[in-house]
Amino acid sequence: MQSMTGFAAAEGGEAQLTWRWELRSVNGRGLDLRWHGPEGRDAIERAFREAVKARLARGSVSASLRLSRRPGAVTAQINEAALATALATAARVSAAAREAGFAVAPLSVEALMARPGVLEAAEIEEDDPARRVAQEAAMLADGELALESLAAARAEEGARLREILATQVDRVASLTDEAEAAAAARATQAGPALTRKVEALVAAGAPAEVGAERLAQELALLAVKGDVREELDRLRAHVAAARDLLAAQGPVGRRLEFLVQEFNREANTLCSKADFTALTAAGLELKTVIDQMREQAQNVE
């Protein structure tokens, strides 16, 4: 079992570039990859999308690839126009200074290079197709490492979810037993309770007493109307199905969410038939636990 939430990162580099992958995954109805990468690297995006489809089944995944130039990958080039302007300006200033009687020292190369605009940074051109292919293969390999780390994080979270859900399923099974015991207690008390109600009506001035045959009929109708045997049987069947899903391999999130809906349907029906305090309490607690299961099931892949 895997969760749909997780985070992973990976870094790499070569002579000219460094890169960093960041992957984030959250809940989603299906599998959705949102790509944030550098322009001109479409081949990496296509290959990574295929890798995600092969590795993950559900979740909203955000993938980010950032590139950075190494300092050595930037060289300096001379701006010829700026150099010519600087030389012409220096010559005019030197001539004017000499005419005024000032001693003028020779202009150093370092001073010329320090003039604004004379030197410009230039990135090394990547005009070697083979180099680019190798570079992108290295980037993609690191991206796949990040993807494996993301899957491992989702699996770790999934193991915790399995433990939580298993505890909740066990609680549903226990509450089903409690509901069955409460239903049995209600059956034993139904006759005396109905008799007391009839006696109270007669004492209050009801026109005639109710005979034993009519009481038996009313008890039979109450028993049919309030019978929760089918709901209890289905709850137990759902408990068995949930345990099978928790033990299964591969994505089970969609089936688990559907099963939780079935749990909730039976709990609602049981509560609607519960006219006995203990049975009502068991039904309400069932609804609470099932709602907690629903919240956890939404995180399962």
Image (spheres, rainbow, N blue to C red):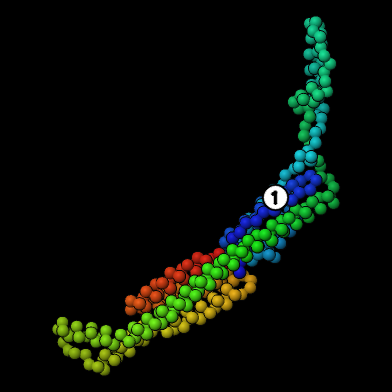
Q: Is residue 67 visible?
A: yes
Residue 109 location (% of width, % of height): 83, 23
Identify the element where label 1 is drawn. Answer: strand
User: What number of labels is visible?
Assistant: 1
- Seen in the picture, residue 297 relative to 48 is either above or below; the reply is below
The answer to which quarter of the image holds residue 214 is: bottom left
Label 1 neighbour load within 10 Å: few <14, some 14-19, many 20+ = some
Residue 106 location (% of width, % of height): 84, 16
Residue nearest the observer in this picture, 187 or 50: 187
Left or right? Give the position of 167 relative to 140: left
Residue 149 location (% of width, % of height): 67, 59
- Seen in the picture, residue 51 relative to 226 is either above or below; the reply is above
Left or right? Give the position of 281 relative to 174: left
The answer to which quarter of the image holds residue 145 is: bottom right
Seen at 76% across and 49% down, the residue is 13
Residue position for label 1: 20
Q: Quadrant of the C terminus?
A: bottom right
Residue type, numbered disc 1: Arg
The answer to which quarter of the image holds residue 199 is: bottom left
Seen at 75% across and 43% down, the residue is 69
- Which residue of the protein is positioned furthest toward the top in this rendering? 101
